Amino acid sequence: MKRIVLIVLIILLAISTKAQINFDAPFDYFLGARITSVEVGDVNNDGLNDAIAISEYAYLDEDKYQVFVFIQNQHGQLNDPIQYSFADSANGDAFLKIGDFNNDNLNDIVV
């Protein structure tokens, strides 16, 4: 009996409609910098995951030692990055983490 149920389930799965996911065309962002770390998490408390990247070396001085925050909009797309500067630590590659580090129930970014 178990074998018949299993065979019926396999047949039903095989003939069921296939799900198809359509993705938008990719977006290219030229940041002019060497990205050393990327994290994904909700940093503006809207329930949507955002993307955060940091750079060290850059071709242009204004792109050196920057945090790039890409906020996700309601359509699932990332907005142009908001840039924040951080100090050069000169201790190797910089990395970032996202989490609630100060226990206020909001995600923080630590470099």
Image (tube, rainbow, N blue to C red):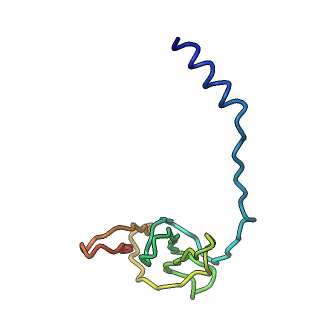
Q: 66 or 38, which lies in front?
A: 38
How far across and down, in percent of the image, does residue 37 sit?
49, 65
Name of the residue lying farthest toward the bottom: 62
How far across and down, in percent of the image, does residue 16 sit?
70, 36
How far across and down, in percent of the image, does residue 108 sit?
36, 74
Q: 17 or 55, which lies in front?
A: 17
Residue found at x 59% / y 78%: 58
Position of the C terminus, as image quadrant, is: bottom left
Badge count: 0
Q: 41 or 58, which lies in front?
A: 41
Q: Is residue 42 left or right of residue 33?
A: left
Tell me if residue 73 comes above or below residue 23 in the rendering.
below
Image-quadrant location for residue 18: top right
Tell me if residue 71 comes above or below residue 92 in the rendering.
below
Residue found at x 69% / y 46%: 19
Tell me if residue 6 comes above or below residue 49 in the rendering.
above
Name of the residue lying farthest toward the right: 25
Residue found at x 72% / y 40%: 17
Q: Is residue 7 left or right of residue 90?
A: right
Q: 23 or 95, which lies in front?
A: 23
Q: Is residue 15 left or right of residue 104?
A: right
Residue found at x 62% / y 18%: 7
